[in-house]
């Protein structure tokens, strides 16, 4: 069986609002158009993988179980709009608290784990997020990185993405670009 391309998406600031250290399911709020973009990927048969840094766990702000409840709520909200995430991959570390790790973005371990679990081709996949560290793993692995900036995206991240990746206005635009390239 040939490995399939996937859409690796950041969570906070890309699919849902980033309230910084979201630990309560009731705080999950989808960004406009996010469910529609995820549903387009689902309908095209593209696995949707969420890869997220959650340093609040290392900082003691919340637990992995809290992060899993937030992910479950995100899945519930997407399901209500006919969309779904195939897999959630969480880095609970922060180098200042737990030391270095290979899974914290821009590290590639979360992406490689998902590729092994789902039979994915990392080089044919798209990597979308609101920070350069979200798209950089795609560049390292030979895929396509697309930055979807918001008001909190550092200007330096946008400049790096303009040089090395793509910059698009919305997740929907990023998904459309990726799906058009799959034809």
Image (cartoon, rainbow, N blue to C red):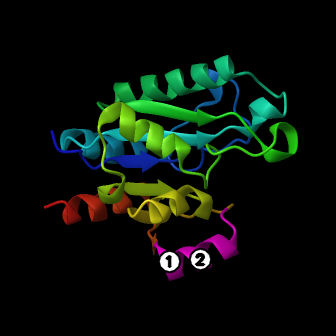
Asked if residue 121 can be seen in this view, the reply is yes
Judge by depth and name the residue closer to the eye, 138 or 14: 138
Judge by depth and name the residue closer to the eye, 101 or 67: 101
| Mark 2: few/some/many CA within 10 Å (<14, 14-19, 20+) | some
Q: Are marks 2 and 1 in contact (CB under 8 Å)?
A: yes
**Which mark identifies residue 30?**
none
Residue 69 lies, with reference to residue 40, above or below; the image says above
Image location (x, y in percent) of residue 58: 79, 33
- Looking at the rendered image, the quarter that the N terminus falls into is top left
Residue 8 lies, with reference to residue 177, above or below; the image says above
Image location (x, y in percent) of residue 157: 64, 70
Disc 1 target residue: 164
Q: Give the residues in magenta.
A: 153-165
Asked if residue 147 can be seen in this view, the reply is no
SS assignment at label 2: helix
SS assignment at label 1: helix
Name the image quarter holding residue 115.
Answer: top left
Name the image quarter holding residue 75.
Answer: top left
Image location (x, y in percent) of residue 5: 27, 50
Judge by depth and name the residue closer to the eye, 31 or 145: 145
Question: Does the magenta-highlighted stretch encompass residue 148?
Answer: no
**Which mark identifies residue 160?**
2
Name the image quarter holding residue 41.
Answer: top left
Q: CA distance from mark 2 to mark 1?
A: 6 Å
């Amino acid at each position: 069986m040939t490995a399939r391309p996937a859409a690796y998406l950041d969570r906070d600031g890309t699919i849902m609002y980033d309230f910084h250290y979201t630990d309560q399911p009731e705080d999950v709020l989808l960004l406009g158009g996010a469910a529609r973009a995820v549903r387009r990927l689902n309908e095209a048969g593209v696995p949707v993988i969420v890869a997220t840094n959650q340093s609040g766990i290392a900082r003691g702000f919340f637990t992995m179980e809290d992060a899993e409840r937030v992910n479950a709520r995100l899945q519930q909200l997407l399901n209500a709009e006919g969309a779904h995430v195939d897999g959630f991959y969480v880095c609970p570390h922060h180098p200042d608290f737990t030391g270095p790790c290979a899974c914290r973005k821009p590290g590639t371990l979360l992406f490689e784990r998902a590729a092994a679990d789902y039979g994915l081709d990392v080089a044919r996949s798209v990597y979308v997020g609101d920070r350069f560290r979200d798209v950089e793993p795609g560049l390292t692995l030979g895929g396509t990185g697309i930055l979807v900036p918001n008001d909190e995206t550092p200007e330096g991240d946008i400049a790096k993405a303009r040089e090395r990746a793509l910059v698009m206005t919305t997740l929907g635009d990023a998904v459309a670009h990726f799906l058009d390239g799959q034809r």
